């Protein structure tokens, strides 16, 4: 499942490293990262094709959940122009499209594992290597930071 504080930890990392801007929270699920970002002046929208409902598992009221801007769709390249920053916290299969957005936009992603090209399955260290190679191939400057949380906690950001 992961560290229960991961959403707030990631949102605080974003707030420390970026000025308030328009954020695409790709594969954002319930929307906790967007909720925290919006509370501190960002304009964050969850982009996730899944039908997500609030539950007692997360600290959001139905009202707070309903206030998070949400697009029920897969994130695609043509959406990136509407945002200044593309983020993903454990975005699974959406990792690759977030990383590809780094060619045009700032990104911050905490990869958890799994798929690149929808085919290649990676463990976390291999996924980090794949991401770094992609960014290097495109001559993109990036940083890697370890977040203060348990579980998958490496953020790759531009």
Image (spheres, rainbow, N blue to C red):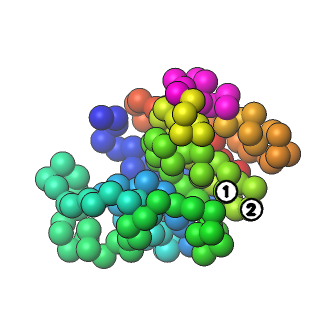
Q: Is residue 78 magenta?
A: no
The residue at 49%/32% (across/down) is 114
Q: Count residues near mark 1 (Cα–Cα under 10 Å), then give few for <14, some for 14-19, many for 20+.
A: many
Pick the quarter of the image with the N terminus: top left
Q: Where 12 falls versus 145 (above or below)? A: below
Is 26 displayed left or right of 145 in the figure? Answer: left
- Where residue 52 appears, as percent x and y from the top left, is 26, 59
Q: Residue at label 1?
A: 101
Q: Label 2: how many residues lie within 10 Å, few (<14), some (14-19) or many (20+)?
A: few
Identify the main secondary structure in magenta: helix
Instruction: Provide the residue span drawn in magenta.
Output: 121-130
From this viewpoint, which residue is outermost toward the left? 56
Q: Is residue 107 left or right of residue 67?
A: right
Residue under pointer 2: 104
User: In the picture provided, is 97 more to the left or to the right than 94?
Assistant: right
Residue 80, given in percent of the width and then of the height, sits at 62, 67
Instruction: For marks 1 and 2, give the CA distance.
Output: 6 Å
Whole-percent x and y of residue 86? 58, 59
Taking the image as drawn, is residue 148 in sight?
A: no
Q: Is disc 1 placed on a helix, strand or loop? A: helix
Examine the image and state in which quarter residue 49 appears.
bottom left
* Label 1–label 2 contact, CB within 8 A: yes
Which residue is found at the position 51% from the left and 71% from the top?
A: 42
Q: Secondary structure at mark 2?
A: loop
Image point (35%, 44%), residue name: 5
């Amino acid at each position: 499942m992961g560290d229960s504080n991961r959403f707030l930890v990631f949102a605080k990392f974003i707030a420390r490293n970026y000025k308030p801007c328009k954020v695409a929270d790709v594969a954002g699920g319930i929307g906790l990262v967007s909720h925290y970002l919006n509370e501190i002046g960002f304009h964050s929208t969850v982009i996730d094709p899944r039908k997500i409902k609030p539950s007692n598992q997360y600290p959001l009221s139905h009202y707070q959940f309903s206030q998070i801007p949400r697009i029920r769709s897969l994130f695609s390249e043509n959406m990136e122009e509407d945002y200044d920053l593309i983020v993903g916290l454990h975005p699974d299969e959406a990792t690759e499209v977030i990383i590809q957005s780094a060619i045009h936009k700032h990104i911050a992603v905490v990869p958890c594992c799994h798929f690149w090209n929808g085919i290649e399955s990676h463990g976390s260290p291999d996924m980090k290597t794949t991401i770094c190679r992609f960014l290097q191939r495109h001559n993109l400057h990036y940083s890697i930071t370890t977040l203060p949380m348990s579980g998958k906690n490496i953020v790759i950001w531009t």
